[in-house]
Image: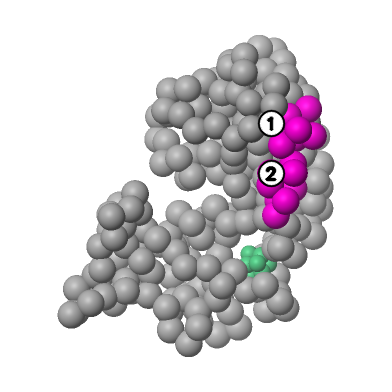
Amino acid sequence: MTAGYTVPSPSSRTSYALPAYDRGMEQHISSRMERAWTLARDRFSGYELIRPGDPTFICQAQDCPVQCCKVFSVTLTEREVERLSRFSGKQARDFLECEDGEPIYLPLADPYVLKRSDGGCSLLGEHHLCTEYEGRPDACRLYPHHVVFVLEETGKPVSGNLDILRFAVRGHSETIVPLLLRHLECPGFTGPPIALHDWEELFIETYRLQYHDREPFEALQPAPATG
Ligand code: SF4
């Protein structure tokens, strides 16, 4: 696998134990997502809504005509640089774009840039496999998934502070709906249908990675499978 979030393998679960309040909340979010997507989809023409039961993501690195690791540049935060350095045992200058021997620092939220070589990520190894998978940046963990927040009435995208977005992820906002999307170009959505519990995990993990939100989410945490 070259990059991308690895969906927890579809389990043999046939049911899971969310408290009634959370189960109702999930159904509430699901139906609102579906309605909001009909209004928002024209603004996100490169994406499709991910619903429970849709095909699971399995990277097709060896046969993929898209090759995300060759196409996209990746930016990293200080924390991601530290993690990649720790897992790989390499100095930051070994895997970041540098100038005069020092990592380039851009005035962005994610200020560092992963080094590229031969028209792709410099960490790509044989058969398009990532050589530093454990320490890979958040962008590689995210791809090809994405969460956007839209106004329920109009489908227009919104940004906001994390307190507001977190409220919406919980399904508590009257006006804002989060949408779990997939990148249409990625041909990796060929696996078995994603179970509801795995869809919830993917939804929460995608949101957390994308918004760097590490606060506890008791009400949204899927309960352990039973049976
Ligand atoms: S585009 Fe999708 S299938 Fe292709 S290498 Fe990237 S994650 Fe894998």
Quadrant location of the N terminus? Answer: bottom right
Q: Residue at x 47, y 45 (%)?
A: 209
Position of residue 218 measured from the top left corner of the image (x, y, whole percent): 50, 22
Q: Residue at x 71, y 63 (%)?
A: 185
Position of residue 69 measured from the top left corner of the image (x, y, whole percent): 54, 71
**Disc 1 residue type?**
Gly
Q: Of label 1 and label 2, which has the lower sequence position?
A: 2
Residue 155, numbered circle: 1
Q: Residue at x 67, y 18 (%)?
A: 25
Q: Is residue 227 above or below residue 59?
A: above
Quadrant assignment, res 134: bottom left
Quadrant location of the C terminus? Answer: top right
In front here: 13 or 166?
166
- Tell whether position 59 is magenta: no
- Tell whether position 47 is magenta: yes
Residue 43, numbered circle: 2
Q: Please provide the residue range marked out in magenta.
A: 35-50
